[in-house]
Image (cartoon, grey):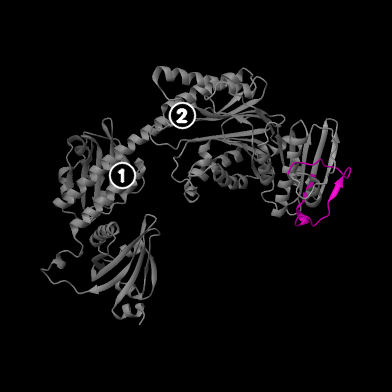
Amino acid sequence: MRTKDLLAALATGLWRWDNASGRVTLDAEAARLLGLPAEPVELTEAAVRSRFHPVDFAEINGVVQLAVSEGTVAEARLRIVDERGRVQRIVRSRTRPRVVDGDFELVGTLQEVPEPQPGTAAAVTPVTGDWRRSREAFLLDAGRALAEARSTAEVLRVAAGLSMPGFMPDGLAVFDIQGDRLSVIGHHGHRPGDELPFSEMTLDTDYPAAEVVRTGRAIYLPTPEEYQRRYPATWPLAAPFARASWAFLPLVNAGRTIGAWMAGFAQPVAFTPDERSVLTTVARMLAQALARAGMQESQQELAVGLQRSMMPTVQPDIPGMAVAARYVPTGGGLEVGGDWYDMIPLPSGRIALVIGDVQGHDVRAAGLMGQLRIALRAYASEGHHPDAVLSRASRFLAGINETESRGHGEDQRFATCLYVEVDPATGLLDVARAGHPDPAIRMADGAVMVRPTAGGLPLGIDPDTDYPTTRIVLEPGETMLVCTDGLIETGGHDLETGWGRLRGVFEAHGAAVDGGSAENLELLADALVQAVHGPSSHHTTGPLVDRREDDIALLLLSREAASCGLGAGDRLARRPGRRTVFSVAQAEPERIAAARRQIRDVLHDWTDPDQVDSAVLLVSEIVTNVLMHTDGDALLVAEVSGERGSRQLRVEVADASDELPHRRRPGELASSGRGLVLMELLAGAWGVDPRGDGKSTWFELYEDAGAAGESPPVSSGPEESLSEPAA
């Protein structure tokens, strides 16, 4: 016989209570026992709760919480009532809680039991669970929930959701002391505006909460008559709520009364010693939680105020460009960080964007950040080039470190920084970097690339460090993101996985063809912060989940598509392309790896992965050839054009050598000399264009050509048109 049939034969119903969704599933027998039609049904928690006697439901909550904490079966007798509150039957419930992600699910049985005989224990207490154990379980759970609450709002939400064993308030209010007046800072079980008559009440008012604050003693009012007799002046304010009993308790923390707590009951409560003990304990925990949350909020407000007082506002009216900025402190209390951003008008008419992060999460980090920001602004305003600005700033911070180390024994601090000088007319960006994450560019077609830039040590480590400058062109319709590592690494991410998480948000947000308006840029800034600091970020944690969270600062700079001189119709007619420029100096062969990554980023959505591998291999061969066989640097330009599925990639690598390439015939064991063969096999078209100051070696790949090698190569120029790179 199946389990379901066996339970039906025994007049036993099955039920499942999902605490997360608030839904209860009943089979036919369980529905019948609850006074519903005998058929399977799914109900809301409120609908099922209305079928239980209110006292029993409050007590079963305590039994369940104890079972959850101990991992045992929750067993109780429950009175089933009709719409008028009359008891129809008594059922025995046996459920086993299962905890999933902090929520629990009850799965168990319901079985009707006989009416208890007068004078028996069951007739006195309908719930078979021990009341004192239920109370202990309730207080344990309430203490944990209140201890975990981080703000006043969270504390009040927890207090509103407490289900006390044996008696459950249907209305709560928390009063705060503001000078010589009471103020309602939170309430539950009331309509909006119901609290207004009780707000701004003076402490000498003939009202229970005011007396509790004055005397520090709790007041229990078991009947409306008792309330009216003791407080006739304010009884008209309480009468409309039609409650049966009230408890007013002082909120005392560190020996000082900080407010009052009111619990109102729809059912009469006698306020036995046990009930008063529960209320008093909850009031103490509530007072401690409110005091702790208030202190944390005050410290956080101080920290944010300190940070924001040092944060400038970005200039919104840059011709042809838009700027947006965000700062998000993620440390708690006074753990302020050293993240900052700045926007500086330069004497040349250009704009400097600065973003940086001073080591540490304390007041000293914030103080050093303020000094460093002022120094950078001063050096930039003098008209220095980006590399000179960072060099001077590094010496400035190194000097502070040396002075404080000698005078106060303070640890030395360093700072990462990215300094970008912007020419709004041309889109030229001169970037100097001091140990900071590279900028990312969203191109006109929506693709995002991290742009490697030359850089030096973080500021303050070596006062004689040089900071080379990298030039980037921000094309019309493109957007640049610069940020501190908090945006990338928050949630346990490293640089690689962090950029991977941000890439999707950056690419998906905003229409590339329409350019970057100020409004769109503000929405993008919010979306980037929400991706790492909002609810969705809990589902995208990285491999380093135990890493400490960091503050977040970000700057967005967008060049409007209209600045290229095209009308709206022209912009829609001409699909935007994708272009990157990258240089590899003779003294920086390690940047060849970065060039390969750039090509992969440019082709990240290319249809044929084999063609992507071919492009990476050819770029590596050509750039290596320039470094080995010429005395100059290599300048790589890669551009993707056309509609997706039939796009064209063109890569040009320019160098300053006039020497034309020649074919070599490598032996079987030779380590070089195969570059020309690779070009003929892998490129859709290739060649060499002589220039007045050198030459440009180029190749093309076509997305609709299929796998590499299916289309015959087409060369331009002499047959021996490529000098041989190293292997």
Residue range highlighted in magenta: 699-727
Of 595 and 317, which appears nearest the observer? Answer: 595
The amino acid type of the residue labelled 1 equals Ala
Above or below: residue 549 compared with residue 391: below
**Residue marked by disc 1:** 147
Give the structural element (helix, strand or loop) at label 2: helix
Of 100 and 314, which appears nearest the observer? Answer: 100
Which quadrant of the rendered structure holds the N terminus?
bottom left
Residue at image coords 88%, 45%: 719
Res 240 label: none
The x and y percentages for residue 441 are 64, 39
N-term mark: 1 or 2: 1
Is residue 275 located in the magenta-colored stretch of the structure?
Answer: no
Above or below: residue 35 compared with residue 373: below
Q: Specify whether 307 is left or right of 627.
A: left
The amino acid type of the residue labelled 2 equals Gln
Above or below: residue 214 compared with residue 541: above
The residues tagged by marks 1 and 2 sit, at their Cα atoms, a distance apart of 28 Å
Secondary structure mostly seen in the magenta stretch: loop
Q: Residue furthest bottom?
A: 1
The x and y percentages for residue 451 are 64, 38
Is residue 720 located in the magenta-colored stretch of the structure?
Answer: yes
